[in-house]
Image (cartoon, rainbow, N blue to C red):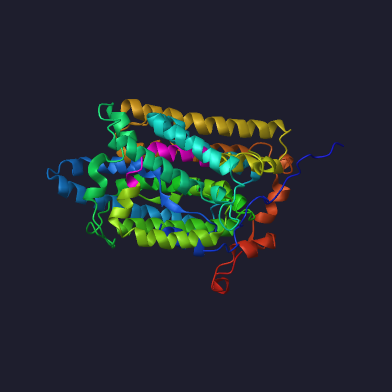
Amino acid sequence: MADITHPPMEQLQDLEYCIDSNPPWAGINTLLQALFGTRLPAVVGGSFAYVIPIAYIISDSSLQRINDPHERFLKSMRAIQGALIVASSIQIVLGYSQIWGLFSSPLGMAPVVGLVGLGFIQRGFPALGNCVEIGIPMLLLIVGLSQYLKHVRLYRDIPIFERFPVLICVTIVWIYSVILTASGAYRHKATITQNSCRTDRANLISTAPWFMLPYPLQWGPPTFSAAHSFAMMSAVIVSMVESTGAYKAASRLAIATPPPAYVLSRGIGWQGIGILLDGLYGTGTGSTVSVENVGLLGLTRVGSRRVVQISAGFMIFFSTLGKFGAVFASIPFPIFAAIYCVVFGLVAVPAHKLTNAFSSSSAAVGISFLQFTNMNSMRNLIITGLTLFLGISVPHFFNQYWTSSHHGPVHTNAGWFNAFLNTVFSSPATVGLIVAVFLDNTLEVERSKKDRGMPWWVKFRTFRGDNRNEEFYTLPFNLNRFFPPT
């Protein structure tokens, strides 16, 4: 029998700081997740999944009839608040009931985690191409510093270019874009070019307040509507799926074991509480795990939860400084698109090659789970290929339809029903999960347990299944006494 050149690895080996390391010295949702949720180094932020339900609420005829723009804005925000508060209950119940995550397998999760990264293709080079004179230099610079100059040590033997490539590159290219804007390079350009390239659009910095303390119900008491709540539930479901994929990728990049169902459910439950807080504080959107920050774990090779906890404290503090946020909002989006080209791919390269390959993370880490399955099985090849293809092509159809017709393919008289289905089928990870879980749990299930990777996966189904789980996922402050794991 031939030797296996690259044997399967349960944990990656190429991080400078793993999940429980303490390297030297957004918020509330991120802090809650890192302390009491999955305890993975995952940043929680706003989600694009909520765009369709929020657009449906804003376009509601009862709100559009209001003539005064300010009053219409306030009532729209109150309606969004109410929908988020009600919809968060689904995630809280599914999380703390420990139902979520029971039906997964390596074969089912691999394409789903990969689609979490690959699903953001439109935010990569297509967005970068709207301002190539900024986007291309940023892409070349971040690849050059993080990969070709990663071993250069300039201060206290620290690989600065590997550890801080995003900060260095964004600062350099941002200054470059400010110079282009000030010199009048975009004065007579097309509108899309000006919106994508200029750093002074909409007078963001000059109009932002110096200090603003967010507080609950700042737009007034929330209003509740069954239709709005049902529409918002679709975004909550999508955010759960995307967060699940991001958690799996984060655990791999942080050199931790895959989170057991108990830990995953705990994280989903706390994320539901986070969405409840989004509704109470009137953020205007719900939250999910940031895929781009998961990719940064692989790019910087720092997967410590302590870094994320400290970052959460900074995010809470700086959220009160309006000017500070406005400065970052003035950064042209093609700069971020160049970063996305790098980090979204990392969360789809097989794990045994990841240590040597260019860290393009979400998509790479997802595909790496296939090393624990039999990819010489035609059954597994069909499930993986069909999941990846439909997971990309179905949302592409829904998004293209929306772009050309200003509404989704599902267009009935029931607006909440339209928003629900259009949201679900616009998410690559959600479509992938539906296809993968259905096929993997109905097609030759008993005969294919070994091919599916279940002998390896079963020890991570429960908290006690692997001794390493206690090291990675035990709650702080000895809270496991009150919330015993299962």
Which quadrant does the N terminus fall into? top right
- Describe residue 267's horizontal placement relative to residue 365 as left or right: left
Point 26% across, 60% down: residue: 212
User: Is residue 274 or residue 160 the one in the foreground?
Assistant: 160
Where residue 468 sits in the image (x, y, percent)? Answer: 68, 61
Task: Please indicate, yes or no, whether residue 437 appears anywhere in the rendered image.
Answer: no
Point 47% across, 58% down: residue: 269
Q: Which residues are magenta?
A: 329-344
Where residue 141 sits in the image (x, y, percent)? Answer: 50, 38
Above or below for 268 versus 48: below
Quarter of image, res 111: top right
User: Is residue 177 or residue 383 the one in the foreground?
Assistant: 177
- Describe residue 410's horizontal placement relative to residue 252 as left or right: left
Above or below for 322 versus 358: below
- Describe residue 225's horizontal placement relative to residue 437 as left or right: left
In terms of secondary structure, what is the magenta stretch mainly?
helix
Quarter of image, res 482: bottom right
Point 41% across, 39% down: residue: 335
- Any magenta on residue 168? no
Above or below for 446 versus 304: above
**Residue furthest out toward the front:** 154
Where residue 251 sits in the image (x, y, percent)? Answer: 59, 53
